[in-house]
């Protein structure tokens, strides 16, 4: 990687960590889009997984008093069921698949009729969220929009949303790392420079730490309004990019 690419990746991780720290969502979508500009898909997925595990793990530590551990366990149960089904599959997506999946999920889930929408705080909502999260994770490599959409309509306090999602995402990204390594995308193919992983972990922690004061100033109404707006804008951009890649094939 060139010096410009390294700086670009580091800044992208810092910004994504900050966005995720404030809204508990969308940071992963921003980061994977940035990584795909300078890396092949398998490398981007592995680096994304390591970085997001660090960012979400640290966010969970920062807000540990607000984590709903019962919901995390229910989410993990659904994720494990999907993992058992997919672990025999070795599938690595291309850029168009990743971008189209990323962009479409927020619109599909968040625009669904309210009675049909399974929120994470409803009965079986967390389990179905975990299952759906893993399915999209293993098919497209990134599943943040699924988790984002399931939490976006919940009536949980913003700090509880951020903290609980951070714990769920840590588990989900660990599952993604294991899956992609099993599918043949070993860490050795990601960059060849382990120090890059260390740099990204440090930037993820820094971005997360910087976000706390901003989250404290937001009201719950502002929090929900901004999260939905960010999801739709980023989703639209990724759909456009994915369609462009399909057109150029």
Image (spheres, rainbow, N blue to C red):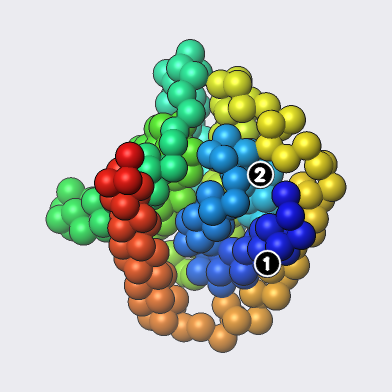
**Is the residue 149 above or below the residue 212 in the image?**
above
**Residue 25 image offset from top left, x and y in percent:** 49, 61
**Is the residue 229 above or below the residue 128 in the image?**
below
Please give the name of the residue rendered at 56% of the width and 21% of the height, measured from the top-left corner.
183
Residue 240: which quarter of the image?
Answer: bottom left
Badge 1 local density, few (<14 within 10 Å), some, or many (20+)?
Answer: some
**Residue 4 image offset from top left, x and y in percent:** 71, 62
Horizontal relation, residue 54 to residue 117: left or right: right
Please give the name of the residue rendered at 32% of the width and 46% of the height, measured from the top-left corner.
248
Who is closer to the viewer here, 12 or 51? 12
Visible residue check, residue 219: yes
The residue where tag 2 is placed is 47
The residue furthest bottom is 217
Who is closer to the viewer here, 12 or 154? 12
Nearer-N-terminus badge (2/1): 1
The residue where tag 1 is placed is 11
Residue 103: which quarter of the image?
Answer: bottom left
**Residue 116 image offset from top left, x and y in percent:** 18, 48
State the SS at label 2: helix
Q: CA separation, marks 2 and 1?
A: 14 Å
State which quarter of the image contains the C terminus.
top left
Who is closer to the viewer here, 25 or 119? 25
Horizontal relation, residue 118 to residue 156: left or right: left
The residue furthest front is 248
**Is the residue 97 above or below the residue 215 in the image?**
above
**Is the residue 79 above or below the residue 227 in the image?**
above
């Amino acid at each position: 990687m060139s010096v410009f690419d390294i700086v670009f990746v580091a800044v992208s991780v810092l910004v994504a960590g900050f966005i995720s720290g404030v809204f508990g969502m969308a940071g992963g979508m921003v980061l994977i889009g940035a990584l795909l500009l300078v890396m092949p898909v398998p490398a981007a997925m592995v680096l994304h997984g390591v970085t997001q595990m660090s960012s979400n793990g640290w966010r969970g530590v920062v807000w540990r008093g607000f984590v709903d551990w019962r919901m995390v366990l229910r989410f993990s149960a659904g994720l494990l069921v999907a993992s058992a089904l997919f672990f025999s599959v070795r599938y690595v997506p291309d850029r168009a698949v990743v971008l189209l999946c990323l962009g479409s999920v927020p619109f599909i889930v968040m625009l669904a009729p309210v009675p049909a929408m399974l929120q994470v705080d409803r009965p079986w909502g967390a389990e179905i969220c975990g299952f759906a999260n893993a399915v999209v994770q293993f098919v497209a490599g990134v599943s943040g929009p699924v988790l984002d959409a399931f939490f976006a309509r919940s009536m949980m306090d913003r700090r509880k949303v951020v903290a609980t999602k951070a714990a769920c995402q840590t588990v989900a990204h660990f599952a993604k790392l294991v899956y992609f390594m099993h599918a043949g995308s070993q860490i050795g193919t990601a960059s060849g420079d382990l120090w890059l992983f260390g740099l990204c972990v440090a930037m993820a922690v820094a971005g997360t730490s910087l976000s706390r004061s901003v989250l404290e100033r937001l009201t719950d109404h502002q929090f929900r309004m901004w999260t939905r707006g960010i999801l739709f804008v980023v989703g639209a951009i990724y759909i456009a990019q994915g369609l462009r890649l399909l057109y150029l094939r």
